[in-house]
Image (spheres, helix red, strand yellow):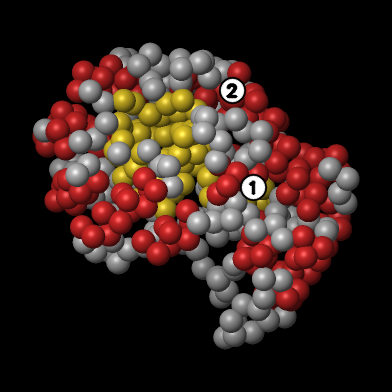
Amino acid sequence: MHLAIYAHPFDLAALGSHGGLSRLADLGFREIAMATSYHDGRWLQPWNPEARVRFLEDGTVHFRPGADYGVLRPLASSSVPARGPSPLERLCAEAPKAGLRVRAWNVCTHNSRLGLLHPELCIENAFGDRLCYALCPAQPAVQQYVVSMVHDLAGHEGLAAIELEAFGWMGWKHSSHHDKASFVPRGLLDYALSLCFCEPCRTRMQAEDGDPEATRAWALDQIERAVEHADAMAPTPVLDGIDARRWDAGDPATLVAEAAILPARSARIATLAALGRAVRQVVPSGLTCAVQVHPQALFTGSQVPIAQTQGLRADEHVLTAYGESMDGIRKLLAGETMFLLDDPQHRRRLCIWPKAPQFTGDADLEQVRDLAAAHGIGAIAIYHLGLLPWRTIERVARVLTG
């Protein structure tokens, strides 16, 4: 099993006093996926001597931008010196010496810094509210921004792969600031809250023979009935009597009632296919292009629903199971859209966050290792070097490589 680990530049800077890159290689890791574009956060770091509680810089990049980004200009983080190699350049030069591959882990459309500067380029929900943390990938300026980032990353000598997170539309449920709501939206309600009605998205819906205003009316109706006219002390109702699990699977019997929003899904497929083609044009042969995906058709997080990946032409699909237990991982891998990834030319990778209560012993790690192998998954990535104690990192490596 190919074993990888996610990391940030400040983790790698602190790694020197803990054995350096060679320690990771000795433990059995074969790849480091370093964050190259990331959002804000507050992290509890078990072993970093510089800071045990770290507030991340919002919406910055850990490489030196050079392409034509247009209006959405990336901001280099404080980890990028005025002179000398950037964190990514340094890692690309040093990691191969320790026998480690380098992967650029790049968050694309989740960027509150740029969203607050350019709200007109963010997702516009059915009420006209802008989700300031979520750039809309249908916007030409956002597409130029994403393609330019990939172009800059692809120019790093020694880079083996680029992994794209938040390549599509970020939804309502993704954590942002101090989230507060009297409801826990799920299924169709979450989807209704997460649909985008910015001008490019409406234009694409019309191109798919849809009526954007009919779709907006459907979304407003779902939200008003489930939130405005609901009781916060009662469970969220199943809207329109639709079983969300059957909707996820694309069952025609349940899709009939949602005819107003089918063009929205088709529009997203077409938009991502076009963006995927543009990205592939700047990725040279031999450099792996990976996209984070999720089996649920209604999923609105930072992974692209598998049902929307037609035309992306990714070399590898990454299934992230950050907060999933073993039972949850089994359900993910058994998802009814997983067959869309059966093309033998496309590799699969599973990402796990080995912490309680989801993982509580070696038996859980052994199960996930065997389950991954049974599903044709050749690599497991561990989240995250800076968030896990060394005791856990060593334990995970021992079991998964055993």
Residue drawn where x is 30% and y is 31% of the image: 31
| Residue 109 in view of the camera | no
Q: Position of residue 1 (x, y in %)?
A: 30, 39
Q: Is residue 370 left or right of residue 362?
A: right
Q: Do the residues under discs 2 and 1 have CB atoms within 8 angstroms?
A: no
Disc 1 residue crowd, few under 14, some 14–19, many 20+, Cα 10 Å: many
Q: CA distance from mark 2 to mark 1?
A: 20 Å
In the image, residue 11 above or below residue 372: above
Kindly identify the amino acid type of the residue bearing the numbered disc 2: Arg
Dot 2 falls on a residue whose secondary structure is helix
Task: Tell which circle, 2 or 1, labels the residue nearer the N-terminal end.
Answer: 2
In the image, residue 236 above or below residue 65: below
Q: Position of residue 244 (x, y in %)?
A: 65, 67
| Residue 390 in view of the camera | yes
Mark in the foreground, 2 or 1:
1
Residue 280's disc number: 2
Quarter-of-image position of residue 98: top left
Dot 1 falls on a residue whose secondary structure is helix
Image quadrant containing the C terminus: top left
> Nearest the camera: 49 or 362?
362
Disc 2 residue crowd, few under 14, some 14–19, many 20+, Cα 10 Å: some
Residue 88's disc number: none
Q: Which residue is mark 1?
A: 307
Q: Is residue 284 left or right of residue 256?
A: left
Residue drawn where x is 66% and y is 38% of the image: 310
Residue drawn where x is 29% and y is 23% of the image: 91
Q: Position of residue 73 (x, y in %)?
A: 55, 27
> Nearest the camera: 342 or 105?
342
Q: Position of residue 210 (x, y in %)?
A: 86, 49
Kindly identify the amino acid type of the residue bearing the numbered disc 1: Ala
Residue drawn where x is 71% and y is 43% of the image: 268
